Image (cartoon, rainbow, N blue to C red):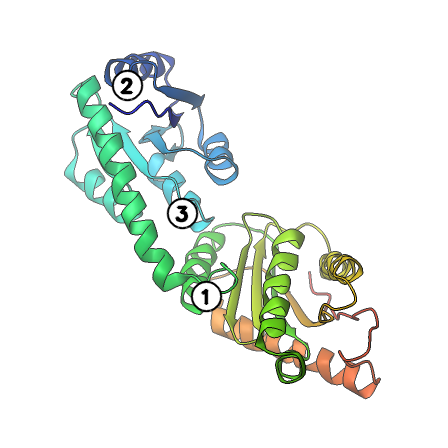
Amino acid sequence: MSSEVVRILLVEDDEDDHVLTGNLLSDGFGSRFTLDWVQDTTAGLERLTTRTYDVALVDYNLGSNTGIELLRDAVARGCHTPVIMLTGQNDRATDLAAMHAGAADYLVKGRVTGDMLERSIRYARERHRLLAEISALSLTDELTGLSNRRGFFTMADQRLQLLERRETQCVLIFCDVDGLKQANDRLGHEAGDRLLVDSARVLCTTFRSTDLVARLGGDEFVVLADDVSEPTEWVVARLERQIAARNASAGPQAPWLSISVGALAFRAGPSTSLAGLIAEADELMLECKAGRRHAGDGSARRTQPRLMAIEGW
């Protein structure tokens, strides 16, 4: 038997069910588990999107919300934790809804034994591991480790559907790494690859772990950030500072990093088009790049990158 300690999150609004679940886990795992307990969807979403668990056990009835709504919100925000839905009713429609929302399993309270719960968690984790390996091959950019175009559009479409129900401010940022071709031609493709990897690192440092950061291909990157309370020029200024910090620490032999940016603020609605948002942000990026060329501030000069943001809340 494995000695691994399994990290479990329980989202359950009934204290008696919390105690019962803990007892079932002890029957199935002995002392080989840790259990975090929260009682509502808000706390559940925060835990699922900011902390790491091996599995989450989520009650279906959570006050005015359901566990399925929590699961959909968490998946749309990039949650990768396998979720097992718990319910007091053996209802086929709810079972199917949980499956379509992405639940790894559906268990009926009162019929679950410790061995059954341990097996469900073990199977859910293994399926999740295998699916993650398959997904990584098709949705991840091999060089930078970011989502690729397919991965971004898959997750961003889910995120925008979720945001339609909220009055939240969003920002889409389209980035183009300046001078990548010249770096490849003059310094070799290894230097160009370093620019791309450093660009990915700068973007990940600038934005939150819940924001979607992707490499669309070539020298193009995109970021989708929601629930943004600050003006776009502040967001872009933060990115500018991270680029400056990278250039200051990279050393004299490293290729100079310069990025042209188009930043677009919006609120998601039923008519929001992801392709349209990217096209508009791309146009803003091209205006930024053209303005810098006109000013003679090209990426070959070791000057502070000037990034352009468009106000739009």
| Front one among 13 and 216 | 216
Q: Residues within 10 Å of mark 2 (few under 14, many from 20)?
A: many
Mark yes or no: residue 5 visible.
yes
Q: Is residue 102 above or below residue 273?
A: above
**Amino acid type of the residue tagged 2 in the rendering:** Phe
**Quadrant of the rendered image containing residue 151:** bottom left
Which residue has dot 3 on it? 75
Residue 312 x, y percent position in the rendering: 69, 65
Is residue 218 found left or right of 7 in the rendered image? right
Q: CA distance from mark 3 to mark 1?
A: 18 Å
Q: Indicate which disc residue 29 carries.
A: 2
Q: Tag 3's secondary structure?
A: helix
Q: Earlier in the sequence, mark 3 or mark 1?
A: 3
* Picture residue at 50% right of the left edge, 71% below the top: 216
Q: Indicate which disc residue 148 carries.
A: 1
**Amino acid type of the residue tagged 1 in the rendering:** Asn
- Mark 3 touches mark 2? (CB < 8 Å): no
**Amino acid type of the residue tagged 3 in the rendering:** Val
